[in-house]
Amino acid sequence: MKDEILYNLKQVHDRIENACKLSGRDASDVQLLLATKTVPAEKIRIAIEAGENLMGENKMQELRDKDSDLQHLNIERHFIGHLQTNKIKDVLKYVTCIQSLDRLNLAQELDKQLQREGRNLDVFVQVNTSFEESKFGLPPTEVISFIREIKKYETLKIKGLMTIGLLDVEKEKMRPSLKLLRKIRDEIYDAKIDGINDLKLSMGMSQDLELAVAEGSNLVRIGTSIFGNRFLGKEIWNENIAE
Ligand SMILES: *Cc1c(COP(=O)(O)O)cnc(C)c1O
């Protein structure tokens, strides 16, 4: 198991490097986040001990269950799943960033809890770039006004935009989502919102990693290519099912 994970990790880093080379980017511009939903702590630990320092979970319960095995390791944890407001307090115990901020009442409730705790939080605004109804995320046309709105919450540090692109067996069908996220960022810059001038793009999963890097991703979130397929009994995990 260990050898396989280490081998896969090396492959993923090679893929990132090659994609960077092809588009003339510096490999240090693209961070790797381990997407660890359904992956047991012992496997995650292998990747961390090999030098990885960023992981993302989709569910509060998994954060909690794996916490005792991982908390003493040098790992930063992000939340990348759909977040219900009643889970905010628990999720905040484990993470330094929420990448799935996609609605005003979530921003408001996060701010309330963060104020109570006297701390700030990094956030990414999640955008639905695939126009699939099953996907979470703001419609692209609402992103600028959303950012203007949430700027009033001083506890929320807006770090970038996140998307789950359209996944398809055909490469060129996956590209438009990724291009769109970048375009939205450009439009945000053009809108010259005070203090919003350095937004990272969190996009790219096992299937569309190379395309995402080519389209400007700064943070790829990889699960399957490192830890293998996710099977929960007979059911394959679907990232769009809320807790
Ligand atoms: C599961 C998941 C990933 C990783 O997907 P893989 O295809 O396993 O690489 C990335 N981002 C989010 C939000 C996810 O839920």
Image (spheres, grey):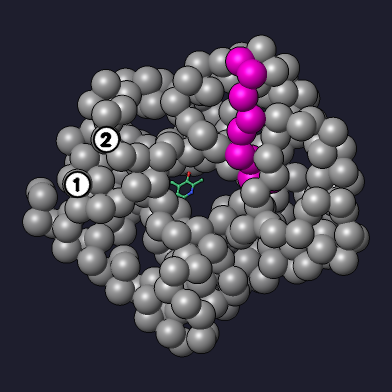
Q: Which amino acid does label 1 sit on?
A: Glu
Residue 206 vs 241, above or below: the answer is below
User: Percent x, y for residue 191?
Assistant: 90, 60
In this rendering, does residue 168 appear at all? no
Rendered image quadrant of residue 15: bottom left
Label 1 crowd (10 A; few <14 / some 14-19 / many >=20): few
Residue 66 vs 12, above or below: the answer is above
In this picture, which residue range is highlighted in magenta? 117-125
Residues at discs 2 and 1 in contact (Cβ within 8 Å): yes
Q: Mark 2 points at which residue?
A: 73
Residue 49, numbered label: 1
Apparent side of residue 155 relative to residue 192 in the rendered image (left or right): left
Residue 11 vs 162, above or below: the answer is below
Local SS, label 2: loop
Measured in 3D between alpha carbons, the distance from the residue under mark 2 to the one under mark 1, in whole angstroms, is 8 Å
Q: Which residue is drawn at 89% across and 60% down?
A: 192
User: Percent x, y for residue 205?
Assistant: 45, 58
Q: Which of 57 and 27 is in front in this view?
A: 27
Apparent side of residue 35 relative to residue 68 in the rendered image (left or right): right
Apparent side of residue 215 relative to residue 204 in the rendered image (left or right): right
User: Percent x, y for residue 195?
Assistant: 80, 51
Disc 2 C-beta below 8 A from ligand 1 = no
Instruction: Please identify the residue farthest to the front as the structure is shown.
Output: 118
Of the numbered discs 2 and 1, the one sitting upstream in the chain is 1
Local SS, label 1: helix
User: Percent x, y for residue 213?
Assistant: 51, 72
Residue 184 vs 90, above or below: the answer is below
Q: Which residue is drawn at 37% across and 76% down?
A: 17
Apparent side of residue 171 relative to residue 139 in the rendered image (left or right): left
